[in-house]
Image (cartoon, rainbow, N blue to C red):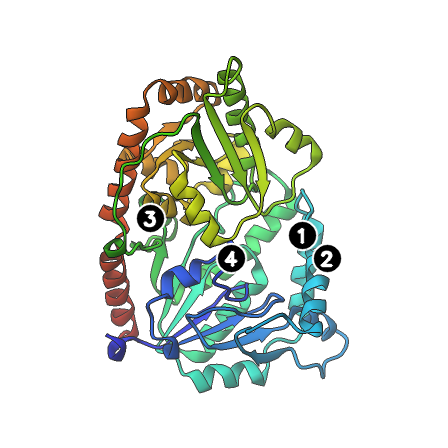
Amino acid sequence: MSEKMPKVLILSINAWQDQSPNHTLSDIFSWWDRDKLAHIYIRAGVPSTKVCDKFLKINENAVIKSVLKRNLKTAKEVHNCTGEMDAQEMAELLEEQKRYGKRRKKYSWPKAIMREMVWSLGKWKTQELRDFVDEFSPDVIFLQMHSVIYMSKIQNYIVKYAKKPVVCYLTDDSYSYVNCKGNLLAMAHRFCLRKQIRRMMKNCNKLFVMSPKAAEICSEMFNTQCAILTKALDYSKLTYSEAQVSEPIKMLYTGRLVIGRANALIHIARAIENINAEGIRITLDIYSSDNLSEDILKELECKGVHFRGEVDREETERLQKEADIVVFAESLDKENINTARISFSTKITEYFASGRCIFALGSREIAPMDYLIKEDAAVAVTDYADIEAALRKLCDNPELIKEYGKKAFECGNRNHNDKVVYSSFMDTMCKVAREK
């Protein structure tokens, strides 16, 4: 199979790290010939992956300084990190985290616009960038689409320079105006971003999305047929084993708490508190790398509900296996529904692999809820008012927990089996590589 694999140049924002919360690239290319992969990224950090060996970093700090100092070198080849970051890399990372306001709760559009302006003025169309593309000489360019204009400009520049077939991967809605909320700066930014995306789509040989609903929305949005590409599971190494339900029942949430998810979990916590009023019948442990305010922690922490902090991927898999119910939660606020409507968390496929009952909270308008409901792969709740009744039903009917654990496992086998996913992806990439 390796012989027919096309050489793929991947363009995305973040450094490729297998253990990061966003491990999309590792999920997609884990089985690819690593000598036929190269990656260009722009955020601070160093790659740490077993999947790819060749990287070019366009240094954002240097691009900012190049506005005034045009002789600065802004791009360089980097290598996989085998230990701790050196002092310069750590300084760059800390500087970038400060600039992006990592712990800031509210997105700043004025700062986002200023960042776009700096990138427009900075020097990144460099000989080092062109040499890297020429030396690797890809058969296909893989664009992970983002909601920032400067990344789209870089991608369009490389596509025009390389003159190679292109596939795009859209995981969030970076095109429509639905979540601009009448904000003039947001709308102006989206107007300019849409211009870059339209240019990108003119050169796109195939558009990948993560779910059937996303395919439906994007096919209409871009007037093109989409292919579905989601995290694959190696079912040859997975077996379903029906576990006895614990007393009390153990619920688990793992993942980010952004775009209103913390609020969604607060509603689940209140329902659990009511159920546990006369004795602990059900518990919820929440694991996340996000730093929560004291007010949110106070609302989350109640009888049977605990925030446990961050946990690594290996530990996450163990915790999922030990749980009776795993939780998928998205906000029901309209603003957050619009933001999440075509996203599809890789956490869902991890839940399928665990063979545990999925308790899903969210709007039917968003892709993952639409998928879980159609597949009958989760106990799905689409209204905050229905949470307590749904959880009480599970407490009173432990066999239902086992039934939905099996349904989740079988859904993963039907739709996310790596043999089917990888074969389809390989066929598409080979076909694209042959196109002009």
Dot placed on the residue nearer the N-terminal end, 3 or 4: 4
Q: Which amino acid does label 2 sit on?
A: Lys
Q: With 329 as the anchor, is 101 left or right in this view?
A: right
Q: Distance between the residues labelled 1 and 2?
A: 7 Å
The numbered mark at residue 98 is 2
Q: With 1 as the anchor, is 307 left or right in this view?
A: right
Neighbor class of circle 3 (other Cα within 10 Å; few <14, some 14-19, many 20+) is many
Taking the spot 44% from the left edge, 31% from the top edge, the residue there is 250
Taking the spot 54% from the left edge, 44% from the top edge, the residue there is 256
Q: What element carries label 2?
A: helix
The numbered mark at residue 215 is 3
Q: Nearer the viewer, mark 3 or mark 2?
A: 2
Q: Which amino acid does label 3 sit on?
A: Ala
Dot placed on the residue nearer the N-terminal end, 2 or 4: 2
Q: What element carries label 4?
A: loop
- Which residue matches tag 1? 102
- Which residue matches tag 4? 146
Dot placed on the residue nearer the N-terminal end, 3 or 1: 1
Q: Nearer the viewer, mark 1 or mark 4?
A: 1
Asked which quadrant contains residue 270, the reply is top right
Q: Whole-percent x and y of residue 249?
A: 42, 27
Neighbor class of circle 2 (other Cα within 10 Å; few <14, some 14-19, many 20+) is few
Determine whether label 1 and label 2 are within 8 Å by CB.
Answer: yes
